[in-house]
Amino acid sequence: MRNGILFAILIVAIAGCSGKKNNAQPALPPGKATLTAPAQNAVCITGSVISDTQSSLTLIWNASDHTDSYDVTVKNLLTSAITTQSTTHTQLTLTLQRSTPYSWHVVSKSNQISTTAQSDTWKFYNAGPGVVTYAPFPAEITAPTYGQTITTATVNLTWTGSSVNSGTITNYDVYFGTSSTPPLFKSAVTDSFVNGVALTAATTYYWRVITHDTNGNTSDSGLYQFSTN
């Protein structure tokens, strides 16, 4: 009997020793990077001039937690051309077109987890030779979003406007219709919305917003579209 008890204790002891605790901590998602330069809605004159049409400019942001690399996306707001480059540093030097507005954001990535974090999106003007005034940034369409399906009989068209010099935007022209070259729908709109626009079922609509400023400059949001069902 005594031998049996000792044998049972030995089995329990062996089982207890063989069990390994998993003390590994789960991978934490990367944090959101904070953009620092060029400043939001600023005219950037700190780049190195390459030619009359191009300059090199360094984008800078603060390091984010639990991050191994960053994807930096830059969009030319005149042509809508988008480029993305990866880096393990917190700055990236790019060759950009002069006298051109851009937007940019940074995506933080980790080697341990697929979750990513995206920074805010900032805009800036890459300065050019002899430019005295800068056109407002193209209006950013907020609703309806591109390709959205609307289920109501009316819709509110909304957008946001911004410029290098605060307060220089005077009004907006809204082009809207069923043609891919929509006609002028509302002119000299001083708000950033047109509410209660009547819709027809099973129709595709196109629209764009032209921004005007006090210096006579304009910018084009680009063509957006949505459908009804």
Image (cartoon, rainbow, N blue to C red):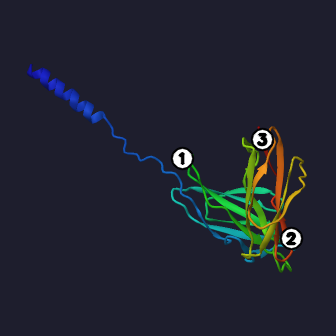
Name the image quarter holding residue 158.
bottom right
Q: Residue at x 78, y 51 (%)?
A: 197
Residue type at mark 2: give it: Thr
Residue type at mark 1: give it: Ile
Above or below: residue 188 compared with residue 205? below
Above or below: residue 179 compared with residue 39? above
Q: Which residue is mark 1?
A: 113
Above or below: residue 135 compared with residue 226? below
Q: Position of residue 107 (x, y in %)?
A: 62, 56
Residue type at mark 3: give it: Thr
In primary-sequence order, the first of circles 2 and 1 is: 2
- Give the residue at the far left of this rendering: 2
Q: Which residue is mark 2?
A: 53
Circle 3 residues within 10 Å: few <14, some 14–19, many ≥20:
some
| Quadrant that contains the C terminus | top right
Q: Residue at x 61, y 60 (%)?
A: 119
Q: Nearer the viewer, residue 229 or 141?
A: 229
SS category of the residue bearing label 2: loop
Note whether residue 95 is visible.
Answer: no
SS category of the residue bearing label 3: strand
Query: Which mark is drawn over residue 228?
Result: 3
Relative to residue 18, is residue 54 drawn left or right? right
Q: Position of residue 76 (x, y in %)?
A: 79, 61
In primary-sequence order, the first of circles 3 and 1 is: 1
Q: Position of residue 207 (x, y in %)?
A: 83, 53
Which is more foreground, mark 3 or mark 1?
3
Q: Position of residue 12 (x, y in %)?
A: 22, 29
Note whether residue 191 is visible.
Answer: yes
Distance of label 3 from label 1 (alpha carbons): 39 Å
